[in-house]
Image (cartoon, rainbow, N blue to C red):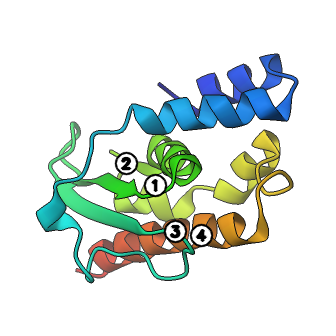
Amino acid sequence: MSIEQIISDFEFIDDWEDRYRYVIELGNKLEPLAEELKTAESKVKGCVSQVWLISERKPGPNGEDILHFTGDSDAHIVRGLMAIVFIIFSDKSPREIVQTDHEQIFKTLDLKDHISPQRSNGLSAMVLRIKADAEAELAK
């Protein structure tokens, strides 16, 4: 699935209750994170819910390394937000990740106006963590 598909689906779904259900369905499609990976190091700080995020460097198709993200949360809506974040950033080069205008994507989806301030802070914390991991890879 692509972010363009999610944007298209959001445009088709008028009601925010239905959009929340859709976001939760996206989260349900995430692979569960193994319990041994749910560590203090993988935990995302700044989230009210429990959120764990793993960045894995892999060889990319064009010779440039990519970052692949996996994660989990104890909250259904947060898992869905995480799924959207992974669709935006996962399996891209660190340079692409750093350059991605996630704020414009969130604005297009109208996400931040329809989630609680705590969820919005958690969403920002996930993105900051992903971008920090990408910047660290670029610095190597």
Do the residues under discs 3 and 2 have CB atoms within 8 angstroms? no
Q: In the image as oriented, which residue stretches furthest toward the top?
A: 12
Amino acid type of disc 2?
A: Lys
- Dot 2 alpha-carbon crowd within 10 angstroms: few under 14, some 14 to 19, many 20 or more: many
Give the SS element for disc 2.
loop
The residues tagged by marks 1 and 3 sit, at their Cα atoms, a distance apart of 28 Å
Between residue 112 and residue 16, name the one nearer to us. 16
Relative horizontal placement of residue 1, taking residue 66 as reference (left or right)? right
N-terminal label among 4 and 2:
2
N-terminal label among 3 and 2:
3
- Front position among marks 4 and 1: 4
The quadrant the C terminus occupies is: bottom left
Please give the count of numbered marks on the rendered protein. Answer: 4
Q: Which residue is mark 4?
A: 122
N-terminal label among 4 and 3:
3
N-terminal label among 4 and 1:
1
Image: 39 above or below 65? below
Do the residues under discs 4 and 3 have CB atoms within 8 angstroms? yes
Give the SS element for disc 1.
helix
Q: Which residue is mark 3?
A: 49
- Dot 3 alpha-carbon crowd within 10 angstroms: few under 14, some 14 to 19, many 20 or more: some
Where residue 73 sits: x, y (%)?
A: 42, 58
Q: What residue is drawn where x is 21% and y is 59%? A: 56
Do the residues under discs 1 and 2 have CB atoms within 8 angstroms? yes
Can you tell which mark lies on residue 51?
A: none
Relative horizontal placement of residue 21, taking residue 72 as reference (left or right)? right
